[in-house]
Image (cartoon, rainbow, N blue to C red):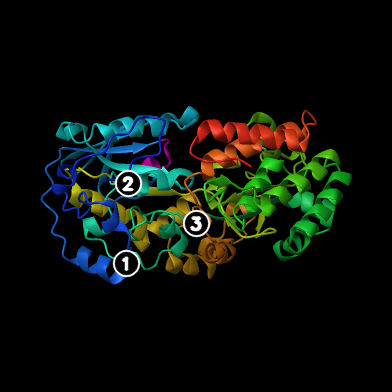
Amino acid sequence: MKKRLVSLLAIATMTATMFAGCGSSNGASDDSAAAEPASQEEIDAEAAAVELPEDTGKVLNIYVWNEEFKSRVTDHYPGYEKVDETHGKIGDVEVVWNITANENNAYQNNLDTKLLEQESASDDDKIDIFLVEADYALKYVDTDYALAMSDLGITSEDLADQYKYTQSIVTDSTGKLKGSSWQACSAGLIYNREAAKEVLGTDDPAEVQAAVADWDKYNETAAKAAEAGYTMCSVNDTYRVYSNNVSGKWVQDGKVVIDKNIDKWVDDSKALVDSKAEDTDDLWGDDWAKGKFPTGKVFCYFGPAWFFNFSLAADEEGSIANQGGWGYCEGPQSYYWGGTWICAAAGTDNPNLVKDVILTMTTDKAVLKEIAQKDQDCVNSKTVLAELASSDEGNVELLGGQNPYEQLAAGAENVDLSNLSEYDQGCNEEFQKAMKNYFLGNATKDEAIEQFQKAIKEKYPDVEVQ
């Protein structure tokens, strides 16, 4: 049977005819046929044999949750013509940007509904491309709603310059790659240079790194920052660093397991909050954002390269970024945050154009270098990052001219996704929500864990809680 979307919607399966027009090999089969993953050699041989049918669609429908990918295509895809904020043209094909914000799961709910309608949709209404994030990628990747890259004739050689972890996230249970990204979102610690000088006596990245090289050193520096009148950051900033370095998946043998590294985050965070070295501000809120300005008295944020461009108010006069006042170092542990993957929708009537968009935006080195330099993205190309790291072309103004690409590239090599699961988004969100009550003194640790377990049981009835 075809695999179903793990969704609040009652997702029905699609028939094999949906994929026939796209040269897909993902036809219906019984469960036993998919038991043994295909080898990469077999997948590449399959891709090499693909002959895509002629494009017949007059409209290229792209489903996204914000403006990021649209801006990348508008600015960097050769031949793209902007018509208005939600329409463009590539040759004779109209491009329609279907944008639904992420709030309250709206993007996924809308995408689920449209994918269900894909087979019966008119040509102009068919989804051609949809984007996914790491936290819920497996929900779509491990179904037949997303075409394998090999179904488009894309081979492992085409994608050989990418970081392996960016492919692991979107590889299904049969071993087939179901998406491609222009980003490699390794992340680190972004520190306030003036605060570092005051607290540590230096803003040199190597010296700051030595002061936050592990969690014990980080906690020592946080105490010094508090003494100097700074808040280190919010506990929510550090969560992903801990959660990316767990020893096992959230759900093991059908049961929810709180990893020892997640538990360490709780204990470390509680101590820091109680000593007023960290706060509990929610990410993206006004209180959390105060650290973008000197008066906010925040020592650091944790984030990837996209954080530079999207989250530090670089265009606002008086912000730390606008004055080139941030620095970057690896931080206590290697981790990643986010990333956006381009998926080809099964049933697209523009398979050749979809293939070209994916290859151009995620493998064309000239395009990727443009993205890195214009948008400060850490792009998914080992070659491009090496070029940027070895010259002034990689210097970032808001980092005071620092070149972060050597550290970002090294971080991307160290990302471990072996414990990624389809339960991550829900478990991570509910755990942080429950623990806030504990940090604020409104519940004991045990009571907060019980709150988390109750929420997970409601969200995922199929799992057991301990």
Does 348 lie within the magenta span?
no
Give the residue number, with chain letter if any, for mark 1. Answer: 156
| In this rendering, position of residue 300 left or right of residue 248 | right
Does 68 lie within the magenta span?
yes
Mark 1 and mark 3: Cα distance apart in space: 21 Å
Q: Amino acid at mark 2?
A: Thr
Give the residue number, with chain letter if any, for mark 2. Answer: 143
- Graded by Cα atoms within 10 Å as few (under 14), some (14 to 19) or many (20 or more), the crowding at tag 3 reads many
Image depth: mark 3 or mark 2 in front = 2
Q: Nearer the viewer, residue 227 or 107?
A: 107
Q: Give, as a single range, the part of the protein colored magenta.
A: 65-71
**Residue 84 in sight from this viewpoint:** no
Q: Residue 41 in the image: x percent, y percent?
A: 28, 71
| In this rendering, position of residue 346 left or right of residue 140 | left
Residue 293 falls in image quadrant: top right
Q: Residue at x 54, y 61 (%)?
A: 416
Q: Residue at x 29, y 52 (%)?
A: 31
| In this rendering, position of residue 84 left or right of residue 196 | left
| In this rendering, position of residue 350 left or right of residue 371 | left
Q: Amino acid at mark 3?
A: Cys
Rendered view: 404 above or below 94: below
Q: Secondary structure at mark 3?
A: loop
Q: Earlier in the sequence, mark 1 or mark 2?
A: 2
In contact (CB < 8 Å): disc 1 and disc 3: no
Q: Secondary structure at mark 2?
A: loop
Q: Residue 229 in the image: x percent, y percent?
A: 85, 41
Residue 403 falls in image quadrant: bottom right
- Graded by Cα atoms within 10 Å as few (under 14), some (14 to 19) or many (20 or more), the crowding at tag 2 reads some
Give the residue number, with chain letter if any, for mark 3. Answer: 378
Q: Residue at x 28, y 54 (%)?
A: 148
Q: Amino acid at mark 1?
A: Ser
Image depth: mark 1 or mark 3 in front = 1
